[in-house]
Image (cartoon, rainbow, N blue to C red):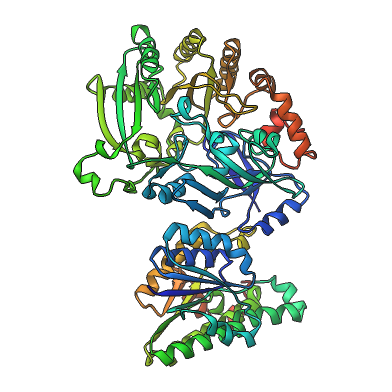
């Protein structure tokens, strides 16, 4: 049986993805900053699916621990999924460097740090899968997602580069770009229903994309076309728009 | 963010702030806010019991914590729905000790309403099978209660409509089964008298319930189909089914796609429906083996069946009368039949003995009916209330959206004790609903 490492397992999306892979009989390694919170998720996955499920402490910002964290995993995961990320209020972040730095370091630097470690391992054994949850917000910089969007843009570029680097080593990298998702984080934001997915729908789409070895997937699929339009608006026009 | 919510009857509808939690710390934060709230599960009570300007949803707090497959003891967080529990326990040879007519309710909601099923006369209501549970009070204090520890809190929480605190964790006993099938018997009764006789005759069956055509008058008044069932033993099922005796039923689901225009539901169409429903059973008696799904959850096969009643919604009216009040049952059914207000479903069931503080079931006949919301309905239901009280009956709070506080008080002799316990554990009325304010269980701001 193969094993999946879920980095950022306390988020709604993390739990949904862990449950989905468990239902497909993958053993699960749940990793998060507060592992104590994951006990109930662990028992739930075990009892519902019968797979082996373990809990691990992982802090995206503690880069120096990432190598030893990955080293300590036994067995080594066959699939590594990076889900963690934070989205602070952009106005607050713009006015407070600490918030900006934390957002960049979690969403980009931390992700690069741990995925470099995983990729090195997969390259050494010539086998493995990496899935990164980025965002449609990374497709074009705009005011309302100034820092978050740019950190995700950097992460998307990293995943594309990693895919290129790993291709000849038989290691696959998939980029996931969700649009709106109903999570606790977005509970107080009105979201347009047709454009928004539930964490469970997102997990289904991620799993199907993983099975088909897709490179980049948008969730839901039409976000691809929405972003295509947004990306093609000329900059002289775009800069005047309120987005 | 405020958005519109309603429970299963789509009446009433209101604007509410709905927030959820995945971890206990998050619930703690939500309760710390100043605003009052009511816990909410899957919104399958019918009226306004889980409506409030602020609701805290348990739906994301739905993890299974332990399952002792040998002893049949299940422990979970309160937001898990019964269908999720069944998927896990049935293949291991266990069943819910009590289940209402839908599996789309949460365990927390099941206890908050102290739900009953077709086996009430044998197994009692769900609270009978709860070993212990955790409650988070409005003060953020967490209390573990059981029939032996904080017994007052336990008793007032079973059927207490969420007013004592937020149920977060439950541990309960399951029922052993050999197969996932039901040995079913259906008997047609020509009238109410015959039906009541049949109930008595078959009272040793674990499961029993009857569907009544309440528009029939004259000698066929109360014609009905009595449905009886037992969990099928291995020997009851055929060779093919024996290969996988605990198989889960296939998930085939229809959706009622839109709100039906309300004019479509009239005396004529309801009569036609009831005629078809009654005559589809060609023989007087049918005996067969069916999966548990159609036996327990016939309506769950159609998602959003409540849309059948149109945009204005419906009220479900459920009351119980003591066993010696057969006259009352007849009087009320006559009153409904005369009014011709139309009810697809009239479900009759005999309750066994139950002593509890605020739970609905008590020994006697319980009848549940749907009424589409129309002009004049509310005053008609007030008339029915008077009849129910005249025959020493009472109404089910989980179905209620309009009862007057004095009707509740007259039906529940221990109401003052219940109110005192709410005062003790929820002194500031932090936990309250539209219903609890209406019924004066909490005081409106």
Residue B256 appears left or right of A8? left
- Seen as rendered, the residue at the extreme left is B239
Q: Is residue A206 visible?
A: yes
Nearest to the observer: residue B335 or residue A77: A77
Residue A162, compared with residue B225, is above or below; it is: below
Residue drawn at the location 65% of the way across and 19% of the way down = B407
The quarter holding residue A126 reads bottom left
Residue drawn at the location 29% of the way across and 45% of the way down = B245
| Whole-percent x, y for residue B113 in the image | 58, 34
The quarter holding residue B409 reads top right
Residue drawn at the location 42% of the way across and 51% of the way down = B88
The quarter holding residue B435 reads top right
Residue drawn at the location 51% of the way across and 48% of the way down = B74
Residue B300 appears left or right of B141? left
| Whole-percent x, y for residue B273 in the image | 33, 25
| Whole-percent x, y for residue B291 in the image | 31, 40
Q: Quadrant of the C terminus of chain A?
A: bottom right
What number of labels is visible?
0
| Whole-percent x, y for residue A184 in the image | 61, 60
Q: Quadrant of the N terminus of chain A?
A: bottom left
Nearest to the observer: residue B217 or residue A113: A113
Q: Is residue B304 visible?
A: no
Residue A25, compared with residue B91, is above or below; it is: below
- Seen as rendered, the residue at the extreme front is B70
Residue A215, compared with residue B280, is above or below; it is: below
């Amino acid at each position: 049986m193969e094993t999946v490492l879920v980095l950022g397992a306390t988020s709604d999306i993390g739990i949904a993805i862990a449950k989905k892979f468990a239902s497909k009989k993958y053993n699960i390694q749940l990793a998060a900053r507060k592992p104590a919170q994951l006990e109930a998720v662990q028992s739930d996955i075990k009892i519902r699916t019968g797979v082996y499920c373990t809990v691990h402490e992982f802090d995206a910002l503690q880069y120096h621990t990432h190598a030893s964290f990955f080293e300590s995993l036994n067995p080594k995961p066959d699939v590594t999924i990076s889900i963690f990320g934070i989205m602070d209020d952009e106005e607050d972040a713009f006015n407070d460097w600490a918030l900006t730095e934390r957002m960049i370091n979690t969403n980009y630097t931390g992700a690069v740090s741990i995925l470099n470690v995983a990729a090195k391992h997969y390259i050494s054994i010539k086998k493995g899968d990496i899935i990164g949850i980025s965002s449609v917000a990374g497709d074009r910089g705009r005011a309302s997602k100034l820092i978050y969007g740019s950190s995700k843009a950097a992460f998307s570029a990293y995943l594309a580069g990693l895919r290129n680097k790993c291709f000849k080593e038989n290691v696959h990298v998939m980029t996931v770009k969700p649009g709106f998702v109903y999570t606790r984080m977005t509970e107080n934001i009105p979201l347009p229903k047709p454009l928004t997915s539930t964490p469970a729908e997102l997990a289904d789409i991620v799993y199907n994309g993983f099975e088909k070895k897709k490179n980049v997937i948008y969730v839901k699929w039409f976000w691809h076309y929405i972003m295509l339009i947004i990306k093609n608006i000329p900059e002289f026009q775009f800069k005047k728009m309120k987005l | 963010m405020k958005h519109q919510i309603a429970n299963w009857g789509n009446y009433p509808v209101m604007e509410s702030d709905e927030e959820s939690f995945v971890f206990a710390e998050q619930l703690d934060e939500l309760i710390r806010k100043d605003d009052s709230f009511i816990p909410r599960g899957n919104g399958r009570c019918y009226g306004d019991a889980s409506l409030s300007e602020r609701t805290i949803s348990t739906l994301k707090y739905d993890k299974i914590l332990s399952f002792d497959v040998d002893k049949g003891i299940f422990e979970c967080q309160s937001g898990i729905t019964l269908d999720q529990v069944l998927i896990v326990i049935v293949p291991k040879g266990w069943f819910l000790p009590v289940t209402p007519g839908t599996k789309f309710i949460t365990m927390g909601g099941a206890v908050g309403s102290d739900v009953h099923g077709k086996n009430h006369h044998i197994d009692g209501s769900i609270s009978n099978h709860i070993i212990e549970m955790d409650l988070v009070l409005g003060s953020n204090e967490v209390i573990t209660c059981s029939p032996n520890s904080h017994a007052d809190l336990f008793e007032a929480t079973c059927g207490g409509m969420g007013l004592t605190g937020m149920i977060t964790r439950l541990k309960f006993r399951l029922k052993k089964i050999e197969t996932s099938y039901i040995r079913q018997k259906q008997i047609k009764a020509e009238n109410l008298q015959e039906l009541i006789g049949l109930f008595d005759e078959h009272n040793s069956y674990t499961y029993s319930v009857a569907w009544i055509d309440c528009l029939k008058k004259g000698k066929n008044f109360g014609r009905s189909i009595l449905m009886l069932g037992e969990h099928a033993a291995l020997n009851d099922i055929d060779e093919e089914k024996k290969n996988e005796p605990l198989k889960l039923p296939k998930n085939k689901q229809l959706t009622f796609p839109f709100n039906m225009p309300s004019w479509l539901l009239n005396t004529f169409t309801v009569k036609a429906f009831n005629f078809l429903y009654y005559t589809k059973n060609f023989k007087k008696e049918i005996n067969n083996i069916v999966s548990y799904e159609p036996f327990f959850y016939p309506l769950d096969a159609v998602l959003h069946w409540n849309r059948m009643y149109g945009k204005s919604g419906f009220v479900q009216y459920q009351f119980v009368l003591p066993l010696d009040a057969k006259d009352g049952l007849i009087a009320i059914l006559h009153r409904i039949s005369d009014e011709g207000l139309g009810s697809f479903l009239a479900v009759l069931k005999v309750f066994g003995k139950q002593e509890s503080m605020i739970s609905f079931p008590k020994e006697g006949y319980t009848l549940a009916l749907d009424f589409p919301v129309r002009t004049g309905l509310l005053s008609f239901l007030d008339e029915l209330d008077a009849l129910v009280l005249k025959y020493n009956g009472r109404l089910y709070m989980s179905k209620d959206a309009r009862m007057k506080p004095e009707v509740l008080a007259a039906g529940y002799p221990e109401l003052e004790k219940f109110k005192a316990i709410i005062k003790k554990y929820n002194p500031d009325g932090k936990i309250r609903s539209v219903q609890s304010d209406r019924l004066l269980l909490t005081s409106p701001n």
